[in-house]
Image (cartoon, rainbow, N blue to C red):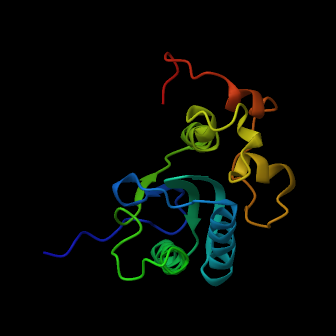
């Protein structure tokens, strides 16, 4: 039986994530992160999607995207992940050894502005939660740092305004009383 088609309607914003097979490391060194970011950018030039945020972690990644045409998200992810998988297998001399990513990407619909800010905070503070850095804006492979300069030209303008204390919110311990 074929799998269900991904629901990624044009104009809807989605949280996308995927990780390495068996939680294996997919970004081993700085060049791997850089190569994936370059693919995210080149993919945006090929497919009509808006990339609002991203965070690359050693064994997974997160992105917040909006497809601007029907089918654009699937085409974008298929191209980016396919190119990176071929590159990864070639660099590690493991061509023919199976999948790099665990499955097709998980996507979750972002329902409104409050939900968008909560998901954005989750994505951008991921390296702090994983104890990789003390402050989210210090992680070189995330949009918290990229947003300050966006020298890579990756990010589309956010559809909502950020609170003036955004970096403080990113680096604050989550409050268990706060709704998701």
Residue with the most extreme top position? 177
Q: Is 94 located above or below residue 113 in the figure? A: below
- Residue sticking out furthest to the front: 93
* Residue under the point 76% across and 41% down: 137
The correct choice, above or below, for 119 with respect to 14 in the image is above
Tell me if 72 is positioned left or right of 24 in this view: right
The reply, left or right, for residue 29 in relation to residue 137 is: left
List x then y, in percent, for residue 173.
61, 21
Picture quarter containing residue 27? Answer: bottom right
Quadrant placement of the N terminus: bottom left
Residue drawn at the location 54% of the way across and 39% of the way down:
115
In this picture, residue 167 sits left or right of residue 175: right
Q: How many marks?
A: 0
Q: Position of residue 49 (x, y in %)?
A: 61, 71
Closer to the camera, 98 or 75? 98
Q: Nearer the viewer, residue 9 or 77?
A: 77
Q: Position of residue 13 (x, y in %)?
A: 54, 57
Give the residue furthest to the left: 1
Q: Quadrant of residue 122?
A: top right
In the image, residue 175 sits, relative to residue 128, either above or below, namely: above
| Of residues 157 and 171, the one drawn nearer to the viewer in this rendering | 171
Nearer to us in this view, 24 or 50: 24
Position of 175 with respect to 9 (left or right) is right
At 55% from the left and 52% from the top, the residue drawn is 58
Residue 96 x, y percent position in the rendering: 36, 82
């Amino acid at each position: 039986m074929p799998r269900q088609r991904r629901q990624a309607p044009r104009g809807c914003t989605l949280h996308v994530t995927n990780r390495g097979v068996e939680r294996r490391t997919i970004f081993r060194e700085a060049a791997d992160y850089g190569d994936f970011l370059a693919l995210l950018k080149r993919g945006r030039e090929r497919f009509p999607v808006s990339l609002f945020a991203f965070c690359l972690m050693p064994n997974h990644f997160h992105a917040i995207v909006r497809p601007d045409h029907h089918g654009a998200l699937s085409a974008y992810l298929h191209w980016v992940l396919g190119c990176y998988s071929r590159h990864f297998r070639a660099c590690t001399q493991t061509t023919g050894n199976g999948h790099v990513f665990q499955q097709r990407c998980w996507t979750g619909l972002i329902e409104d502005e409050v939900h968008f800010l909560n998901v954005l905070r989750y994505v951008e503070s991921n390296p702090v939660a994983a104890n990789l850095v003390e402050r989210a804006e210090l992680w070189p492979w995330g949009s918290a740092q990229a947003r300050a300069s966006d020298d890579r030209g990756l990010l589309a303008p956010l559809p909502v305004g950020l609170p003036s204390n955004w970096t403080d919110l990113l680096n604050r311990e989550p409050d268990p009383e706060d709704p998701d």
